[in-house]
Image (cartoon, helix red, strand yellow):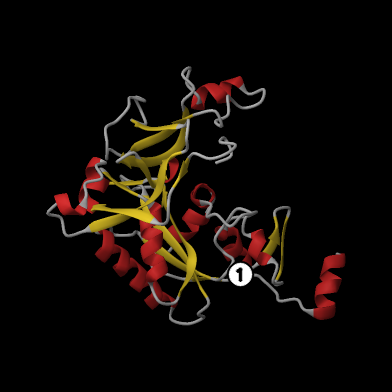
Amino acid sequence: MAENTLAIAFAKGICSDVVAAEALWSEGQATPRAASAEAETVEIVGCGKAFPEHEIRIVDAETRKPLGERRVGEIQVRGPSVMPGYYEQPERTVEVVDPEGWLSTGDLGDLASDAIYICGRKKDVIIVNGKNYYPQDLEWVANEVEGIRAGNAIAFASHRAGLNREAVVVVAETREAEGREELAGKVSSAIAQSTGLTVDDVAIVDVGTIPKTSSGKLQRAHASSTSAASCVQRRTTARCVPRRTWSSRSSRICGCASSVRAAERLSIASRVAAARTRVRLTGAGRRAWRRQ
């Protein structure tokens, strides 16, 4: 993370912790599989132990009180490579760095035998019927479905009028032009079978549709806060959202291949609306359009 100029933790090789799924989602307890009678489990990736002269602890996200081993909470770090604060932003600094130098990372995880295990981001957690679901778990399952482009599924919660909870939305990319409703059904069934969660909407979209950062990270908050969610809400079944290129200052559409990065500048819903009146422009026609 940027607030740590060197490192927080190091792991020797790949390590993970297999824990009881229900206890993790309902109670925030990372109970080892061997100590639980639950058949359903979740595998959490480990990031090793704290870097020398650095400390890691888990606190309650609301009260900031330290939690015990294998209790899931917000991860805080402290050490010589942790920033003292944001430059000329004292108000923002106070929000994340306490008087003792502990930096609140916004990440959720637990400590087991002094090793840190990451569950997800606090702001990305999806809460349904009192249970906390981590979008990474839903995305992992979706990515396992044949036909879904690996690493290109995103899960988030979205407000929906008339629903007494947040709607759970999954958007996944595919290269397939046909059979998208069937593919959406497979994704929904796989998630239900793996996590017990019924997804409200699954959208199967073209490659380059899902918003990402310049480094390739999924932008869940962006997807949830834009009208991408409302686009999905208008239909109860999966649908194809064609890839488009657009400008945030113009509704004129051009069907060129550079639309992949443009996904970060406008919502999925805008593309769907624009697609209804889209005219494909190629060769001289495209050049003439650009001169307008």
Q: Which residue is mark 1?
A: 243
Secondary element under disc 1, as helix, strand or loop, is loop
Which quarter of the rendered picture does the C terminus lie within?
bottom right
Give the quadrant of residue 30. Answer: top left
| Residue at 58% across, 57% down | 216
Residue 173 visible, this orientation: yes
Left/right of residue 226 with respect to residue 118 in the rendered view: right
Compared with 16, 182 (above or below) is below
Residue 160 visible, this orientation: no
Left/right of residue 133 with respect to residue 205 in the rendered view: left
Residue nearest the viewer, comparing 16 with 124: 16
Q: Position of residue 52 (x, y in %)?
A: 47, 35
Left/right of residue 30 with respect to residue 279 in the rendered view: left
| Residue at 36% across, 57% down | 137
| Residue at 85% across, 72% down | 287
Which quarter of the rendered picture does the N terminus lie within?
top right
Compared with 52, 176 (above or below) is below
| Residue at 71% across, 76% down | 280
Q: Position of residue 90 (x, y in %)?
A: 60, 20
Q: Position of residue 175 (x, y in %)?
A: 53, 77
Residue nearest the viewer, comparing 92 with 269: 92
Q: Tag 1: Cα neighbours inside 10 Å, few (<14), some, or many (≥20)? A: many
For the image shown, how many numbered marks are present on the structure? 1
Going by the picture, which residue comes out furthest to the left? Answer: 37
Compared with 138, 49 (above or below) is above
Q: Position of residue 21 (x, y in %)?
A: 24, 53
- Residue type at numbered disc 1: Arg
